[in-house]
Amino acid sequence: MTSLDVGTAEAAEGVNAAVAMGDVMQKIAEHKGCGTSGGSGKASCGSGAGEGDLPTEIWEKVKNHPCYSEEAHHHYARMHVAVAPACNIQCNYCNRKYDCANESRPGVVSEKLTPEQAAKKVLAVASTIPQMTVLGIAGPGDPLANPEKTFKTFDLISRTAPDIKLCLSTNGLALPDHVDTIAGYNVDHVTITINMVDPEIGAKIYPWVFWKHKRYTGVEAAKLLTDRQLQGLEMLTERGILCKVNSVMIPGINDKHLVEVNKAVKSRGAFLHNIMPLISAPEHGTVFGLNGQRGPSAQELKALQDSCEGEMNMMRHCRQCRADAVGLLGEDRSAEFTTEKIMAMEVDYDLESRKAYQEKVEEERVAKVAAKQEELATLAGAASDIKLLIAVATKGSGLINEHFGHAKEFQVYELSTSGAKFVGHRRVDLYCQGGYGDEDSLETVIRAINDCHAVFVAKIGGCPKNDLIKAGIEPVDQFAHEFIEKSAIAWFKAYLDKVNSGEIEHQERGDAEIRQGALINAA
Amino acid sequence: MTLKIIASQCTSCSACEPECPNVAITEKNGTFVIDPKKCTECIGHFDAPQCAAVCPVDNTCVIDNAYPRYQAPA
């Protein structure tokens, strides 16, 4: 009760903050497209925006949030607690019956938690992983279809681990009913999944919604959902709560329409738009999986993200993680923190040592930015229309620090004379299995990064090196353990020099595949 | 009659539990069950049985023919 009262007072203050926030949003809007004109070196102010590109208020809110800042996701970790099993809508890309420990997609968990177990888990994880700064409730159902469990969890955590940011992810149907409570718990990041603003399209994505004791179907259901989503979004942004919008790109259903969705959410104050590829395979048991609905290719996804980028900040580093994921984006340490293990853990929550660790992380970030700026200066004056992609094997910290054979994903950067811009990531099967290269997975790796000109790694064996060269992808290992962006720019500069001198000829690459199946080789 | 939950299909998502106007649904051995003594098929409360309306798996909350049809008190 007390915390709710406090929350109400803060919500009242939020009204003033909301006015300032409106200005800020306007500034961000005007600010778009800044990076393409050299100078700052950011090819976009999008989610990749760093301190210099964002108004201070926004930067303070997102700088340690891996899901809201591309820059932060190299350094900070998040966790989700699966306290919200119930859902109030049905989506054609979701079937909650199919759970599997090797499956990495939203709506899937291995264990449900009570709010008390969740609070203990958060403390255990935060003590083990000091760069864990964000707790999200994302399901496996809808957090706001389980309001008691969700808010009880927030309440417990805000008491025991006050430095951890709280966020939640919802389909939006119940959102307008809970906005004040959300503000009351200082939840300052909310993600709404909005796949359409046209009920005719919505009817192809959502078979039904359950609202006010009734199941609605078809266009009526979709109309209800979109109205509630947009109303909830407006209510949140009015209160100064940062909103991200997630959209699932479903080719042939909403792919073209998402440009309209982008405009609709931007005009209602959403901070960031995350367009994700549909994950769809028959073994998931979803309607889309079973009826053969395909997901987009890597280039189709990138083209849509690029076309929306002029409108607002785009997120491209989403890993579409499970509702019980733990760790840096792209890694999942949830298996280390099963309920059984947590309950046996002695937890000593040491706020000071967490702070000290995070200060070290900040130093690392500053060094990384400085290195990039310095390298970028050497590109000044270079004129070329060439834009190309590279893949990078990294374990985090913004460094090229992963072996080719150990990479479970590659980060993809777009290089041009305005610098290196993060544009996505590609999940792959492990190439190296217990010391031996697996030829089949090498093929899937090549398909996943087939649109890249080079792959940057800390180390790579002779065999895969030759196969990559044959496939037209240059393996680059001379920047091992150096900063990604700085190295990429240095390599790009040398590439341009070689093109200019006629030593090599620049060729466009083809498309790449987005991996659909379960992460069966998870180590 | 009352409704019953087909255990093999129940995902244990708990969506039905708070919707039941008769508090007839509880968790047992990892899935949810309906107490036939309490279930009224939502007659008098709602147009349709709430457990079936909110359940994410089709044909999982179904009429249990083993019991006589519920009679609303006159």
Image (cartoon, rainbow, N blue to C red):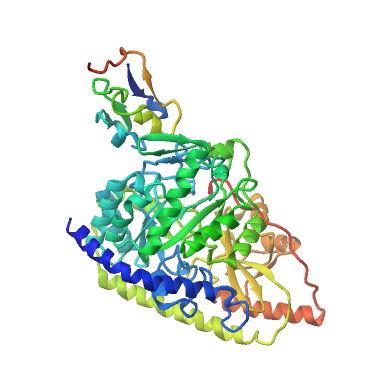
Residue found at x 35% / y 44%? A145
Q: In the current view of this chain or complex, which residue is farthest to the left?
A: A2
Q: Is residue A147 above or below residue A482?
A: above
Q: Is residue B44 above or below residue A297?
A: above
Left or right: where A317 falls relative to A167 = right
Residue found at x 43% / y 61%? A243
Q: Is residue A139 above or below residue A283?
A: below
**Location of residue A475 in the rendering, given as x and y in whole percent from the top left corner:** 67, 68
Left or right: where A143 falls relative to A204 = left
Q: Can residue B7 be seen in the rendering of this structure?
A: yes
Total label count? 0
Residue found at x 36% / y 14%? B65
Q: In the current view of this chain or complex, which residue is farthest to the right?
A: A502
Q: Quadrant of residue A494?
A: bottom right
Q: Can residue A435 be seen in the rendering of this structure?
A: no
**Location of residue A324 in the rendering, given as x and y in whole percent from the top left corner:** 39, 51
**Location of residue B11 in the rendering, given as x and y in whole percent from the top left corner:** 40, 34
Decide which of A196, A167 is in the foreground and name it: A196
Q: Quadrant of residue A61?
A: bottom left
Decide which of A367, A286 is in the foreground and name it: A286
Left or right: where A310 falls relative to B56 = right
**Location of residue A40 in the rendering, given as x and y in whole percent from the top left corner:** 56, 82
Q: In the current view of this chain or complex, which residue is farthest to the front?
A: B74
Residue found at x 31% / y 23%? B43
Quarter of the image for the C terminus of chain B: give it.
top left
Quarter of the image for the N terminus of chain B: give it.
top left
